[in-house]
Structures are given as structure tokens and as C-alpha cells.
């Protein structure tokens, strides 16, 4: 049997034993991600999300993330920090792995993923702006704490009662701000589709603390405007991006976002789609307002000038400072 020890005295159960019959009768399979399978568990102590991982060496990382997020709002902690964890033998859970199995137990969010909450929402709607503002707050808190979330996609944020909660923080990197180096590098570099991960991770290079700016601004952009930052590219090829995009920026002296070009085809951009994006920006991200200029500037510094130069990307704190009032 696997023994799970609760990490907080607020829970009624000091410890619980889980075995094969528990998995079969009480665990409801929810899904599987890059790190492991997730189950819904209704117990006498409440309803929880249980993540089953093959890596039991993750506990020290979790304790450090918990320490850094002490006092952080529920949006970062409620689904991001496990309330209990433990180790069991894979055979006890019907698994064939020879390694020890780690169980992480989180609060269960009785809501929906952000990706589903936005499904039928109009561009720049009040609900979209509300979620974008909450994302800003979450990313600012994480960055200030040195917790670098590199799996920050819309299916890793949950909505309940209009409030947003981050998840999957156990694989986040931990940046030592004082010593300017990694204490723990990120375990997961999320890549749901081409361009969704920053080049330094997409090419399996060294992660950077500003890698989270790419994920954060990409998600905020999509939350507000419903499409990806690179939606106007015709050549969906990572190799093209790596070899040609920065050259295109220099040749055409591009210094704004979205790019303004007389001949978009020369940079493998779709003229029609680029036109739609430019009109969308004119309507919803006005250059006449300070926050609109700031938003465009941050986009260019992240996906243009900062494409392969992470240090040029803005911090999430800077983005938070300029945009929170507008959303």
C-alpha cells in the first residue's frame, strides 16, 4: 500500500493508504499530460486531483516552490501546490514501470479549463479581458517569486466562479534571482503547436527566466484576441523561423507589432491574414492610448527583437505595470 501524508494540518486525515482497489473504485481518470496521468478522487476528506508521476525526486522542487509562494494569492497556490504527496510501488497501481511512483494530491477545481471557458467568447469581450488581467497577476507573482512556468497553456489554467487558477507548477523552473542562475531548471517545455514555445526551448537549448514571458504574453494575447501571435505566417516551419525571421526583421527595418510591410510575401507572411490582424489591432489595441502602444511594444520585444534574444524580452512585472489598468 502507498501511504500519503498530508502537508497541512487543516485536513482531517493525517494519512491515507491507497492501493489497487482505490485506483479501480474511487479514482476517475481525467487525462494525461507530459508528466503523468491525472485522476479525480472523491474521498472522505474532500474531492482532489491526483497526479501519478514516475519521478519521485520531484518533492524537493515542490517544497521550494511552496516556500517561494507562501502568501501568494489562491490563483497561484490553490491548484498549483499539492496538499499532499507520497510514493508507492508502480505494481500497486497497475503500472508496469520499475521505478517508484510519485503521487501528488491537489485541490480539485470544480470548473473548466480556460480553453473551454473562452470557446464562444467574442474578441476582447469583458470576460476575456477579465481572464487576461488575472493571467497578468498570476505571471507577475510567479516571476517575482522566481517560479518559471514553461507549460503555461490555456489547458493548464482552470476557471471556477469567474476566478482563474494556475496548475502544473510542479514542473516549473526555479530561478535564483540573487545568484542569477537556475536552482532547478524547468522539467517541462510545453509545445502544443509550432511557435507556441520560445526558440530556446523549441530547439532544446538552455532555458531562460524570460522564457516565461513568451508563454505568458502568448497566452494573454490569445485570451484577448483569440488567435496566436504568429497567426499571419504562411510558412509554418520552425526551421524557416529560426533562419529567416530575424533576417526579415532587419531587412525591412520592422520595429512594431504587428509587422507593417509593403510586400508581406517576401517574409512568408499571408497578406490577407496580416491585414485582418492589423485591423484587429486598430480596433482593440489602439496606438492612440498609452497601454495600446505598450502592448504593441511588448509584443515586438518578445516575438520580434526578442525572438532568439530572451534577455531583450520584457519582464512580466513590466507588462503587468503597464497593462493591468487597461484590462
Image (cartoon, grey):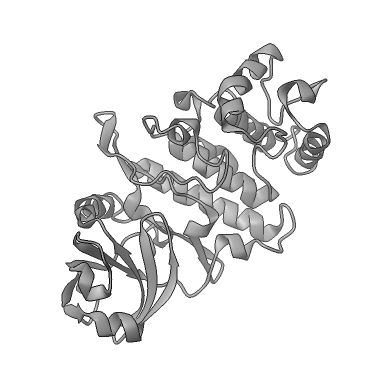
Asked if residue 199 lies left or right of residue 26, the reply is: right
- The foreground one among 118 and 102 is 102
Asked if residue 215 lies left or right of residue 105, the reply is: right
For residue 110, above or below residue 252? below
Q: Quadrant of residue 252?
A: top right
The number of callouts visible is: 0
Q: Residue at x 28, y 55 (%)?
A: 70
Residue 118: image x %, image y %?
64, 61
For residue 127, above or below residue 25? above
Residue 196 in sight: yes
Residue 114: image x %, image y %?
56, 61
Q: Quadrant of residue 47?
A: bottom left
Residue 320 in sight: no
Residue 87: image x %, image y %?
18, 66
Q: Residue at x 72, y 23 (%)?
A: 267
Q: Residue at x 68, y 12 (%)?
A: 251
Residue 235: image x %, image y %?
69, 32
Asked if residue 118 lies left or right of residue 217, the reply is: right
Quarter containing the N terminus: bottom left
Q: Residue at x 31, y 79 (%)?
A: 23
Amino acid at each position: 500500500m502507498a501511504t500519503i501524508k498530508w502537508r497541512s494540518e487543516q485536513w482531517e486525515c493525517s494519512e491515507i493508504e491507497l492501493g489497487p482497489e482505490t485506483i479501480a473504485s474511487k479514482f476517475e481518470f481525467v487525462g494525461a499530460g507530459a508528466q503523468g496521468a491525472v485522476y479525480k478522487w472523491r474521498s472522505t476528506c474532500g474531492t482532489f486531483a491526483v497526479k501519478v508521476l514516475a519521478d519521485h525526486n520531484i518533492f524537493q522542487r515542490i517544497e521550494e516552490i511552496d516556500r517561494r509562494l507562501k502568501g501568494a494569492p489562491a490563483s497561484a497556490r490553490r491548484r498549483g501546490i499539492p496538499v499532499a504527496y507520497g510514493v508507492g510501488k508502480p505494481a500497486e497501481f497497475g503500472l508496469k514501470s520499475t521505478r517508484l511512483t510519485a503521487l501528488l494530491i491537489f485541490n480539485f477545481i470544480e470548473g473548466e479549463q480556460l480553453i473551454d471557458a473562452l470557446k464562444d467568447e467574442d474578441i476582447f469581450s469583458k470576460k476575456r479581458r477579465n481572464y487576461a488581467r488575472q493571467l497578468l497577476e498570476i505571471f507577475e507573482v510567479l516571476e517575482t517569486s522566481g517560479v518559471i512556468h514553461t507549460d503555461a497553456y490555456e489547458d493548464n489554467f482552470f476557471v471556477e466562479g469567474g476566478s482563474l487558477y494556475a496548475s502544473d507548477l510542479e514542473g516549473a523552473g526555479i530561478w535564483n534571482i540573487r545568484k542569477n542562475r537556475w536552482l532547478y531548471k524547468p522539467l517541462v517545455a510545453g509545445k502544443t503547436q509550432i511557435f507556441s514555445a520560445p526558440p530556446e526551448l523549441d530547439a532544446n537549448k538552455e532555458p531562460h527566466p524570460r522564457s516565461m514571458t513568451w508563454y505568458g504574453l502568448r497566452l494573454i494575447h490569445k485570451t484577448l484576441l483569440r488567435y496566436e501571435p504568429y497567426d499571419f505566417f504562411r510558412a509554418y516551419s520552425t526551421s524557416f523561423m529560426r533562419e529567416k525571421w530575424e533576417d526579415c526583421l532587419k531587412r525591412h527595418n520592422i520595429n512594431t507589432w504587428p509587422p507593417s510591410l509593403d510586400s508581406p510575401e517576401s517574409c512568408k507572411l499571408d497578406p490577407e491574414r496580416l491585414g485582418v490582424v492589423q485591423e484587429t489591432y486598430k480596433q482593440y489595441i489602439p496606438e492612440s492610448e498609452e497601454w495600446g502602444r505598450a502592448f504593441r511594444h511588448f509584443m515586438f520585444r518578445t516575438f520580434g527583437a526578442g525572438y532568439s534574444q530572451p534577455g531583450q524580452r520584457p519582464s512580466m512585472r513590466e507588462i503587468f505595470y503597464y497593462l493591468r489598468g487597461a484590462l
